[in-house]
Image (tube, helix red, strand yellow):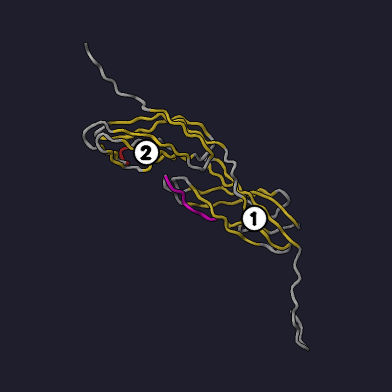
């Protein structure tokens, strides 16, 4: 009787589905049934191209007859559904291939930033954001006002750009977007700022402004025989 062994093409199918810009994680178990230690080096892994996939840890060892739980992380940047593959490589154990189903859905958790000032005054608030693209990017910016023009970019325009350096796969890079609130009405007004790139589409920050009547100043002391300017 002849026994023929075949290479196992796919060990497991992993499905990742979650809101864009958020991290989805899964734990997989890798066993070492041999009598020698097995090493997995991060540089040897074959990761999907153009997808934010990383492992914790990236490089690891498995003792003989033991197993480890490896965390696989995925961060979708646009609304999409993609089939791909992840291959983990060990000199001692060979290749571990995983079929991936990657899905990004709309993120309902949209941030809101509050602005307050008096009518006739303006205020600028720097909004802290993160970019997750692993290349330098120039984001397109657009202010979308809902009750007249009350919000602007720092330079007073409704559209512009913001250049940001590249991020690493597992960590975003911070950047700041200054927004000017110059109310034209008393009370509450709303807007949003759209941040977009050709590869990932758009994400938004909601803007909520509250403006009050000017408050009286004083009392102001005027010495006898003097005047105010």
Kindly give the residue lying farthest to the top in the view shown.
Answer: 1
Where are the magenta residues, as a range? 170-177
Could you tell me residue 44's position as x and y percent? 30, 38
The picture places residue 104, in percent across and down from the top left corner, at: 52, 36
Specify few, some or many for label 2: CA neighbours under 10 Å numbering under 14, 14-19, or 20 or more. Answer: some
Q: Dividing the picture into quarters, in which one does residue 97 lie?
A: top left
Q: Across the whole image, how many numbered discs are drawn on residues?
A: 2
x%, y% of residue 187? 75, 56
Q: Which mark is residue 70?
A: 2
Q: Nearer the viewer, residue 38 or 135?
A: 38
Q: Residue at x 57, y 42 (%)?
A: 202
Q: Residue at x 36, y 38 (%)?
A: 69
Q: Which residue is mark 1?
A: 114
Q: Are marks 2 and 1 in contact (CB under 8 Å)?
A: no
Judged from the image, the secondary structure of the residue bearing numbered disc 2 is strand
Q: Name the one closer to the observer, 225 or 38.
A: 38
Kindly identify which numbered label has been placed on residue 200.
none
């Amino acid at each position: 009787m002849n026994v023929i062994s075949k290479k196992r093409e796919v060990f497991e199918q992993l499905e990742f589905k979650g809101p864009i810009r958020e991290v989805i994680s899964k734990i997989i178990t890798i066993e070492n049934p041999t009598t020698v230690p097995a090493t997995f080096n991060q540089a040897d892994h074959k990761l999907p191209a153009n997808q934010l996939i990383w492992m914790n840890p990236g490089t690891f060892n498995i003792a003989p007859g033991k197993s480890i739980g490896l965390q696989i992380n995925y961060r979708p940047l646009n609304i999409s559904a993609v089939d791909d593959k992840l291959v983990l490589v060990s000199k001692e154990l060979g290749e571990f291939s995983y079929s991936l189903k990657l899905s990004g859905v709309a993120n309902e958790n949209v941030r809101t930033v509050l602005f307050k000032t008096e009518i006739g005054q303006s205020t600028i608030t720097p909004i802290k954001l993160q970019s997750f693209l692993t290349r330098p990017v120039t984001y397109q910016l657009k202010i979308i006002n809902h009750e007249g023009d009350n919000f602007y970019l720092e330079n007073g325009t409704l559209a512009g750009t913001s250049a940001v350096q590249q991020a690493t796969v597992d960590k975003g890079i911070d950047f700041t977007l200054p927004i000017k609130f110059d109310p034209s009405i008393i009370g509450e007004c709303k807007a949003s700022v759209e941040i977009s790139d050709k590869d990932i589409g758009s994400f938004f920050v909601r803007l909520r402004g509250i403006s009050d009547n000017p408050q009286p100043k004083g009392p102001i002391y005027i010495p006898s025989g003097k005047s105010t300017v």
